[in-house]
């Protein structure tokens, strides 16, 4: 599991699951009791974050997108879903 913190108190986590295939590169964002899974374009796949924290998370994902893709494929090398 890779864990990154952005400057809004939000934890950004990339899970590595050996033997499991994630369907789409994504991160998990946690803030207090809230949690959401977002793809690396900032679309919410599941969960909820407060609106201001969601906006900050989307901005952070956009600013760090290439690094997140690199980390994703490093943690999930068997995943074949590459961005188009």
Image: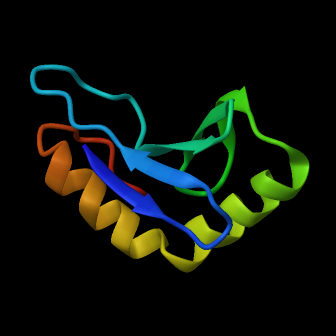
Q: Is residue 46 left or right of residue 50?
A: left
Name the residue rendered at 74%, 65% in the picture. 56
Q: Position of residue 33 (x, y in %)?
A: 68, 30
Which quadrant is the N terminus positioned in?
A: top left
Q: Position of residue 38 (x, y in %)?
A: 59, 43
Q: Is residue 67 left or right of residue 73?
A: right
Q: Is residue 60 above or below residue 73?
A: below
Q: Residue furthest top?
A: 20
| Picture quadrant where residue 55 is located | bottom right
Which of these two is toward me, 6 or 81? 6
Q: Is residue 49 above or below residue 52?
A: above
Q: Is residue 67 above or below residue 36?
A: below
Q: Residue furthest bottom?
A: 63
Q: Is residue 84 visible?
A: no
In the rendered picture of this protein, how many numbered marks are placed on residues?
Answer: 0
Which quadrant is the C terminus positioned in?
A: bottom left
Q: Position of residue 3 (x, y in %)?
A: 35, 54
Which of these two is toward me, 34 or 40? 34
Q: Position of residue 4 (x, y in %)?
A: 41, 61
| Picture quadrant where residue 63 is located | bottom right
Q: Is residue 56 left or right of residue 38?
A: right
Name the colour scheme: rainbow
Name the residue rendered at 41%, 47% in the picture. 13
Name the residue rendered at 87%, 57% in the picture. 52
Name the residue rendered at 10%, 27% in the picture. 18
Q: Is residue 5 visible?
A: yes
């Amino acid at each position: 599991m890779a864990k990154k913190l952005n400057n809004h108190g939000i934890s950004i986590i990339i899970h590595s699951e050996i033997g499991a295939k994630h369907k789409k590169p994504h991160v998990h964002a946690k803030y207090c009791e809230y949690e959401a899974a977002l793809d690396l374009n900032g679309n919410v796949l599941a969960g909820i974050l407060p609106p201001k924290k969601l906006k900050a998370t989307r901005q952070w994902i956009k600013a760090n997108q290439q690094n997140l893709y690199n980390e994703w494929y490093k943690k999930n090398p068997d995943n074949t879903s590459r961005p188009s």
